[in-house]
Image: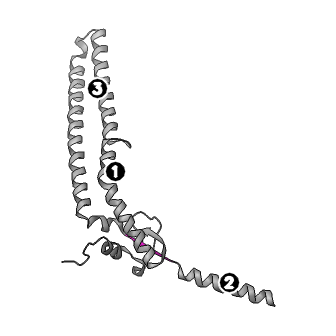
């Protein structure tokens, strides 16, 4: 009987602490969209991306023109000339593909620029999220934008406005 009371006591203490633990969520897309530096960085990255895309497109057009010209003249070329032209076209195609990878690849110029411009802002937001979670006693915070499988979220658990307030961003609509 004494063991039963001890077990019940332990279980009631555990259940009380379990109810005190909470989870919340934030919408990082909303938070980041309200930070002017983030929006400016995104615009800067988009302009840079467009410039690189134009450069790549120009190079591809040159290759397409070379190929069309080669197709038109192919019958009048000897074997050595054909091989030379084909090698040139293939070489240029490889160069463009390498250039695309250098710019748009996982470790490319765009990824590095994105990291340089956006990571400091994301770190500030993460710090604010951590602070709000600690202040509110929240033990788990989900990002509603990246969390797959969430089919219900109670607005009471939304910490987005608190994070924006912590960042000093006015959340009132004009």
The answer to which of 5 and 58 lies nearer the viewer is 5
Residue displayed at 20% across by 34% down:
58
Of residues 154 and 24, the one nearer the viewer is: 24
Stretch in magenta: 22-26
Residue under label 1, please give it: 115
Q: Residues within 10 Å of mark 2 (few under 14, many from 20)?
A: few
Q: Is residue 104 above or below residue 24?
A: above
Say which of 57 and 17 sits in front.
17
Residue sitting nearer the eye, 88 or 83:
88
Image spot of residue 157 (x, y percent): 42, 78
For disc 3, the neighbor class at 10 Å (few under 14, some 14 to 19, many from 20) is some
How far apart, in angstroms, are the residues tagged by discs 2 and 3? 71 Å
When asked about the image quadrant of residue 71, the answer is: top left
Which percent across, then down, holds residue 67? 25, 24
Asked whether the viewer can see residue 152, the reply is no
**Left/right of residue 3 with respect to residue 137 in the rendered view:** right
Where does label 3 land, which residue?
92
Q: Which mark is residue 11?
A: 2
Looking at the image, is mark 2 or mark 3 nearer the viewer? Answer: 2
* Residue at image point 45% right, 72% down: 151
Vertically, is 87 above or below 5? above
The image quadrant of residue 170 is bottom left
Q: Would you say the residues marked 3 and 1 are in contact, meaning their CB atoms lie under 8 Å apart? A: no
Residue drawn at (22%, 63%), measured in percent from left and top?
Answer: 36
Q: Helix, strand or loop at disc 2?
A: helix
Cα separation between marks 3 and 1 = 30 Å
| Sequence-first tag of 2 and 3 | 2
């Amino acid at each position: 009987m004494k063991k039963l009371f001890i077990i019940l006591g332990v279980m009631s203490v555990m259940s009380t602490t379990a109810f005190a633990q909470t989870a919340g969520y934030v919408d990082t897309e909303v938070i980041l969209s309200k930070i002017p530096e983030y929006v400016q960085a995104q615009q800067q990255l988009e302009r840079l991306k467009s410039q690189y895309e134009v450069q790549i497109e120009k190079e591809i057009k040159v290759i397409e023109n070379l190929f069309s010209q080669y197709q038109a003249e192919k019958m009048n070329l000897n074997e050595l000339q054909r091989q030379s032209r084909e090698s040139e076209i293939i070489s240029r195609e490889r160069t463009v593909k390498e250039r695309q990878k250098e710019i748009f690849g996982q470790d490319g110029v765009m990824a590095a620029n994105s990291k340089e411009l956006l990571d400091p802002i994301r770190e500030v937001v993460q710090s604010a999220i951590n602070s709000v979670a600690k202040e509110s006693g929240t033990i788990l915070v989900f990002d509603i934008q990246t969390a797959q499988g969430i089919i219900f979220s109670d607005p009471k658990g939304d910490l987005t406005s608190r994070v924006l307030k912590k960042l000093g961003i006015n959340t009132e609509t004009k």
